[in-house]
Image: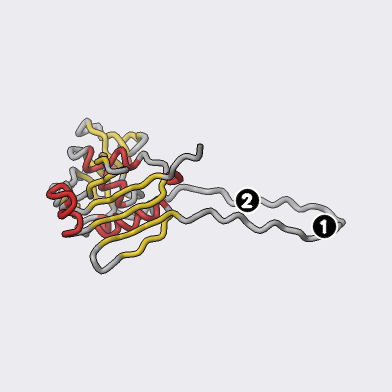
Amino acid sequence: MKITIPKPCHENWTIMTPEEKGRFCQVCSKSVRDFTTATDMEIMADLTENPNICASFRPDQLDRNLSYSFLNSLFAKFAVSFVLTSGGIVSAQTQPKVNPPTKTDVPVQVKGEVAPISSPKTTPVQRDQDTPLRLGKPLYINENNLPLYVLEGKMITNKQFQQIDPNNIKNLKVLKGKDATSKYGAKGKNGAVMITLKRKEK
């Protein structure tokens, strides 16, 4: 998927009314989605489900292929290891949790004043205010470039895939090219992601 803005909007982003996912443009009477801190996976998902939205992008997010970074973000989201084979099959399996070793050290008494330790606060990704923005209705090539999602043998939507709890994933298998089309026909032309969930213990 490649995203471009053929007719950029020249309205001032800073004077638009802030909203939960962007800003509201009084001139166009439209909500403008802010993608400047979004991942490629989030951009592809949102544009597939909402093709007529106006949006704000960084220049480096436009006119490039999002497919490779989509796979990277896919595996990063589910915190799995993966191996790409020569046949175009990506196999992934969640890593088992390793319990830290139990400490058996003999306690030692220490005298003195306790100094407070401040833990660092986690802050969301912030966009550099000096970074130029590109506003407008995005046009994306290969709009159906998302892969086919198959959960336990059943095809699901991208939205349903996004709602899966990563902790419940046992295995991810990605088929590409002929491997995907031979198994799923035309529906697998953009690849297929097969998801296996962990079995609940009785």
For image coordinates 28% across by 55% down, the residue present is 174
| Amino acid, disc 1 | Pro
Q: Residue 165 occupies which quadrant of the picture?
A: top left
Report if residue 177 is visible in the image. Answer: yes
Between the C-alphas of marks 1 and 2, the distance is: 25 Å
Q: Residues within 10 Å of mark 2 (few under 14, many from 20)?
A: few
Q: Residue at x 26, y 45 (%)?
A: 149
Tag of residue 119: 2
Q: Which residue is mark 1?
A: 107
* Residues at discs 1 and 2 in contact (Cβ within 8 Å): no
- Residue found at the very far front of the displayed protein: 202
Name of the residue lying farthest toward the bottom? 86
Q: Is residue 39 left or right of residue 79?
A: left
Camera-side residue of 97 and 38 = 97
Give the residue displayed 76% in from the left and 53% down from the top. Answer: 115
Q: Determine crowd level at label 1: few under 14, some 14-19, many 20+ residues with C-alpha closer than 10 A.
A: few
Q: Tag 2's secondary structure?
A: loop
Where is residue 153 drawn, in percent x and y? Answer: 28, 43
Judged from the image, the secondary structure of the residue bearing numbered disc 1 is loop
94 and 7: which one is in front? 94
Query: Where does the image place residue 99, in percent across and percent down from the top left?
Result: 60, 54
